[in-house]
Amino acid sequence: MFVLIVGSGRVGSAIAKTMLGEGHEVSVLDEDPGAIALLDIGRDDSWEDRGGSFTVGTALEIDALIEAGIERADAFVASTDGDNTNLVIAQIAQRRFNIERVVVRVLDPARAKWYSEQGLMTICPTQTAIELLEAAVREEVA
Amino acid sequence: MYMVVVGAGKVGWNLARELIDRGNEVTLIESNPNRYAVVEEELEHAVQQGDGSELWVLERAGIERADMVIAVTGDDEDNILICQVAREKYEVERVISRCNNPRNLEHFELLGVRPAISATNLILRLIEHEVPKYGPLHLLDLPQERLEIIELEVADTSPAAGSLVRDLGLPDGSLVISILRDGTGFVPLGDSVVEPDDEVLVVLDIGLEAKVAERFAPAGANEAA
């Protein structure tokens, strides 16, 4: 499948590398041209040599999204460092480009919960951490 | 009315002050602590500090009883999200959003956030209105006598280009009195030919300007406008 990942920080770049390694076609969009470095860490060959593509642009720019291939994406990952940016572009991907699989990283548990009730697939690392930490604390005490 | 305004920049602060002066109850939300401290000196309890896209901050500001939510931060994604949750989660009847980058207007529209106000677009529209590309230049206005003289450039693709003066199709009450070509002018006769890039001087009754101008404007310009 063709995966478009918007936001190439720790999370986005890791997902991109895994997906490319699994044989999928992967395109990454980030506003920082330097973000491509994260995709090359620990590798001798470059991201683009390995078949990945990288586009510089802001997430809300339709032209940049189109250049990055949003019109033919099967899956869309919103993983910029802004919750609101992620929630807005995920809805654009879903409603305007009809992408079947849209996943959104949302750090704030409250917004993650409400938007997931509205039909977005939100992943909240904060909530996951809270649950893991709580479980770890209980285990320690017990 | 109870109004929640998010973003205490120039727009938000002035807006909050005007709304309070008009007798509304207002809560202004500002995330930046320094900015908050400045605004708080004037507005006191009417301003709260916090990230206005956090639900608990909106709830603390009383969004559930707000009649109107106005999002005027400098970030379009924040404004979209604030208005979306205001309307869909808290069922606020009226939302108004500022759109910083007019290219983002389609996103506001797509996500049902309206009205979205773009100052850039408003100014652009005014400029387009004030400075039409092939607009007439007023050389003489005699409102008392109900006469004016205007100068127009003949566009390449206009109906006038290549036409005889008598065939220009100008409305009654207007007359071409001079054609300027290559730096010199002459008084045309009915069988003088109007060429592209000529400048023509037309004397006309007040009120005929639009009709006259369209004969010299590029083909299709009227449909576009």
Image (cartoon, coloured by chain):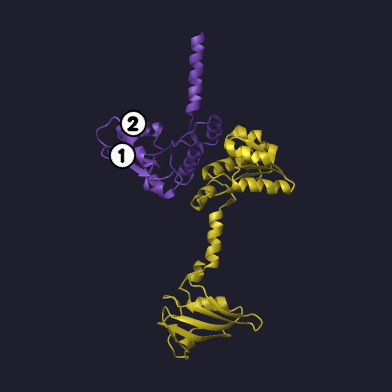
Determine crowd level at label 2: few under 14, some 14-19, many 20+ residues with C-alpha closer than 10 A.
Answer: few
Residue at image position (60%, 47%) is B10
Q: Is B214 or A40 nearer to us in this picture?
A: A40
The yellow-coloured chain is labelled B
Check disc 2 and report the residue beneath it. A18
Residue at image position (68%, 41%) is B43
Establish if B179 lies above or below B89.
below
Determine crowd level at label 1: few under 14, some 14-19, many 20+ residues with C-alpha closer than 10 A.
Answer: some
Q: Earlier in the sequence, mark 2 or mark 1?
A: 2
Q: Is A61 or A71 nearer to us in this picture?
A: A61
- The residue most toward the top is A142
Residue A136 appears in the picture as rendered: yes
Quadrant of residue B197 in the image?
bottom left
Residue B56 at x, y = what percent?
61, 32
Residue B76 at x, y = what percent?
53, 45
Quadrant of residue B157 in the image?
bottom left
Residue A2 appears in the picture as rendered: no
- Helix, strand or loop at label 1? It is loop
Q: Is B27 or B93 nearer to us in this picture?
A: B27
Chain under callout 1: A
Residue B53 at x, y = what percent?
57, 37
On residue A52, the disc is 1
Establish if B193 lies above or below B210.
below
Q: Is A128 or B52 nearer to us in this picture?
A: B52
Which quadrant of the rendered structure holds the N terminus of chain B? top right
Establish if A22 lies above or below A92.
above
Q: Colour of chain A?
A: purple
* Badge 2 and badge 1 in a common chain: yes
Left or right of residue B68, residue B193 in this image: left
Contact flag, marks 2 and 1 (Cβ < 8 Å): no
Left or right of residue B192, residue A17 in this image: left
